[in-house]
Amino acid sequence: MESELVLSYTSAYLIGLMGSAHCLGMCGGISASLSMALPVGAGYRRRQTLMLLAFNGGRIASYVAIATLVALLSTSAADQYASIGPILRTLAGSLLILMGLSMGRWWQGIRYVERLGSPVWKKVSPLTRRVMPVDRTWKALILGGLWGWLPCGLIYSTLGWAALQPSVGSAAMTMLFFGLGTLPSMLATGYAAGWINRLKGNSRFRQLTAVLLIGFGIWTLPLMHLTHSGH
């Protein structure tokens, strides 16, 4: 069991790391704007670092909170319906495949899934205006916590993966490692936005990431695990 959890956490981290190009499109702009809004002068780099860490800390914390909620619901459903496991595995694998197809720019079907989160975001997004302008670290923390609810196919794909975990705690840890995987590129956005944007636009990098995500999705599907069990 312990080795399986390590594999899940590692996989979640890699999904976050590989999906960085998508993260930059969804959250990179707001992350970069935090740096640009700060007055240049003594202590600028320290303030910039604190702002970026606070925003991304809040963002990752919201992922953990969402995963905890999803895991509570899925665990409750699994207790009532024995067949829920394969359904969740199919959903998680399908979402990862859709995310890979979107990232490779082969098909944007994941956008239909992202629309499911729009009603929640309509309730949350007005709250972001209350912390504007983001001139304090605590405001960046709150903004990150709110921004984590932005409808995102990559987050939904990983939440499906988290719902497969054996406990609520391991589901939360899965999303924590996913968030940590997104952290390098999100921090780099604040420090080196130009270089990151060029990487995001590199078709080979994007397509390699897409193929790997599709591979994760296929590996997650129940059929693959039934075949493995048979051997």
Image (spheres, helix red, strand yellow):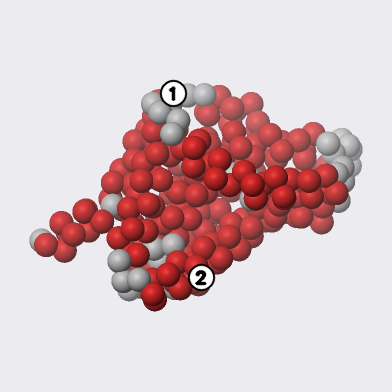
> Which label lies toward us, 1 or 2?
2
Q: Residue at x 68, y 34 (%)?
A: 29
Question: 99 above or below 1?
Answer: above
Numbered mark located on residue 157 in the image = none
Q: Nearer the viewer, residue 23 or 222?
A: 222
Q: What kind of residue is marked 2?
A: Leu
| Quadrant for the C terminus in the image | bottom left
Q: Nearer the viewer, residue 164 or 203?
A: 164
Residue denoted by label 1: 203
Q: What kind of residue is marked 1?
A: Ser
Q: Residue at x 37, y 58 (%)?
A: 88
Question: 79 above or below 126?
Answer: below
Q: Residue at x 65, y 31 (%)?
A: 193
SS of the residue under disc 1: helix
N-terminal label among 1 and 2: 2
Q: Nearer the viewer, residue 80 or 137?
A: 80
Numbered mark located on residue 72 in the image = 2
Circles 1, 2 touching at the beta carbon (< 8 Å):
no
| Quadrant for the N terminus in the image | bottom left
Q: How many marks?
A: 2
Work out whether residue 205 can be spotted.
Answer: no
Question: 211 above or below 121?
Answer: above
Left or right: 94 as drawn, with respect to 194: left
Left or right: 164 as drawn, with respect to 136: left
* Other residues around mark 2 within 10 Å, as few (<14) / some (14–19) / many (≥20): some
* Other residues around mark 1 within 10 Å, as few (<14) / some (14–19) / many (≥20): some
